[in-house]
Amino acid sequence: MTDATASHTPQPGQGSETAKSSLFTVSPRTRRRNASERRFKAYGITAILLGLLFLCFLVYSILSKGLPAFTRTVAEVELTLTQAQIDEAESTLLKTGAYRDLMIAELGEVLGDVEPEAIQRIVGNPGAMLRNFYTANPDAIGTTVAFELPTASRVDGYFKGRITREGQANSTFLTPSDLDLADRMQEEGIIKREFNWQFLTGAEASDDNPVAAGIGVSVVGSFYMMFVVLALSLPIGVAASIYLEEFAPKNRFTDLIEVNISNLAAVPSIVFGILGLAFFIQFAGLPRSAPLVGGLVLTLMTLPTIIISTRASLRAVPPSIRDAALGVGASKMQSVFHHVLPLALPGILTGTIIGLAQALGETAPLLLIGMVGFVALRYPDTIASGFLDSNSAMPAQIYTWAARADQIFYEKAWGGIIVLLVFLLTMNIIAVILRRRFERRW
């Protein structure tokens, strides 16, 4: 009987070969492959870190430049006007100027020996605000009323750090002595900082009163516009997707439709604005600058996105679901609407929300149909007027502010970006919640 170990006894010259082919020895080729994998992981981690770095820089830039728009500098003034003073102010040609002079005289008595021009450069021109108050509240005549009047934009920028003393050394709009007076008024409690609710609830303002500008009316315009987009694009897009994916025959005509849908998804948004101007306004005669027209234009732009995402969601449902439904006697329509569509609903909702978020941030098509920032100075009176009356939208309002000369409008543009991002984040959170709510596993 032959010894089993004898057959495994290494022959002369075979010891080194056995050591090289051992499982515990890493070959040079394996080392290169592992090094390549480590490099790829390092590249991926570096890319993620760079993306996070740019994201942090973007968030920091938006917050640092936009958060000051949510605060404002006001001057607290107690004013007592008699009926004779009101009548005298109403009899003048410049009524708001007369109310402003009454307020400046009251502040001059509080501050002592101060030039009226200096007070005016600090508090701006609140005459319209005072006149509107006494016109709406005649019972306040003869009584002491405490007003919180927004200061001039340059004074507001001084207390926010946007304007420095060195920059105002040779300025005629706000002199260093005016800044000394502003500091004194702050020490005496006349000037203070507070949350700027008017920015969230107000309307657009002129260059003469930039501190009064707000984004509230534009938010309402965007809401009406998004309602039109949702009401039209969701049912039309989903119905078209279901037909193309489940019922339409595969021929050259449907292939042509699919190619055109893909091409429309890549068309620049300004082209849809030109189409809306030519068809909805010039041909159909719909009112210019109306949220209804803006919603129709954005519906045309959003439909290809919704159709593509919906078809992808329907295609992701396994064919066995359809076969099982048809096998138990369901019709084609029953298998689609009772089995396939509920499983594809999370993807459909996600694609719809993404399309709406994209439409919410569009500016070019809205500018072409006249939805610029200064068209609406008040809230709509009724629901119907909210769709048909002239209004603006948040991206158009932000664009208008960014193009204005006064720095406070630039600050408000960054604040409007924060409001717009809050809307976008809200819509994406809703998409995640709906996806989790309707998600089913098979």
Image: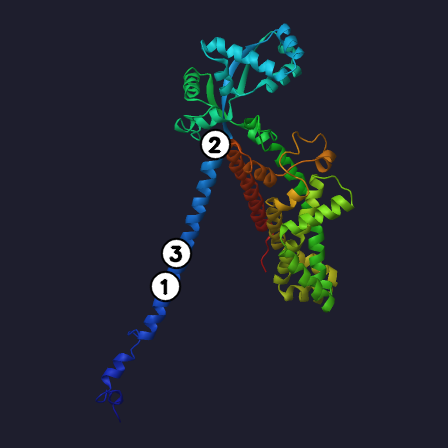
At label 1, counting other C-alpha atoms closer than 10 Å, the crowd grade (few under 14, some 14-19, many 20 or more) is few
**Viewer-proximal residue, 118 or 301?**
118
At label 3, counting other C-alpha atoms closer than 10 Å, the crowd grade (few under 14, some 14-19, many 20 or more) is few
Mark 3 element type: helix
**Viewer-proximal residue, 351 or 409?**
409
**Viewer-proximal residue, 336 or 388?**
388
Identify the residue at image location x=41%, y=48%. 53
Mark 1 element type: helix
Of mark 1 and mark 3, the one earlier in the sequence is 1
What type is the residue that disc 2 sits on?
Pro
Identify the residue at image location x=78%, y=45%. 284
Q: Which residue is mark 2?
A: 68
At label 2, counting other C-alpha atoms closer than 10 Å, the crowd grade (few under 14, some 14-19, many 20 or more) is many
How much space separates mark 1 and mark 3, taking CA atoms? 10 Å
What type is the residue that disc 1 sits on?
Arg
Pointers 1 and 3 in contact (CB under 8 A)?
Answer: no
Q: Residue furthest right?
A: 284
**Quadrant position of residue 398:** top right
Of mark 3 and mark 2, the one earlier in the sequence is 3
Identify the residue at image location x=62%, y=53%. 268
What type is the residue that disc 3 sits on?
Thr
Of mark 1 and mark 2, the one earlier in the sequence is 1
Q: Nearer the viewer, mark 1 or mark 2?
A: 2
Looking at the image, residue 168 sits to the left or right of residue 318; the answer is left
Looking at the image, residue 366 sits to the left or right of residue 169; the answer is right
How much space separates mark 3 and mark 2, taking CA atoms? 34 Å
Which mark identifies residue 39? 1
Which mark identifies residue 46? 3
Instruction: Give the x, y percent position of residue 95.
Output: 63, 15
What is the number of callouts on the image?
Answer: 3
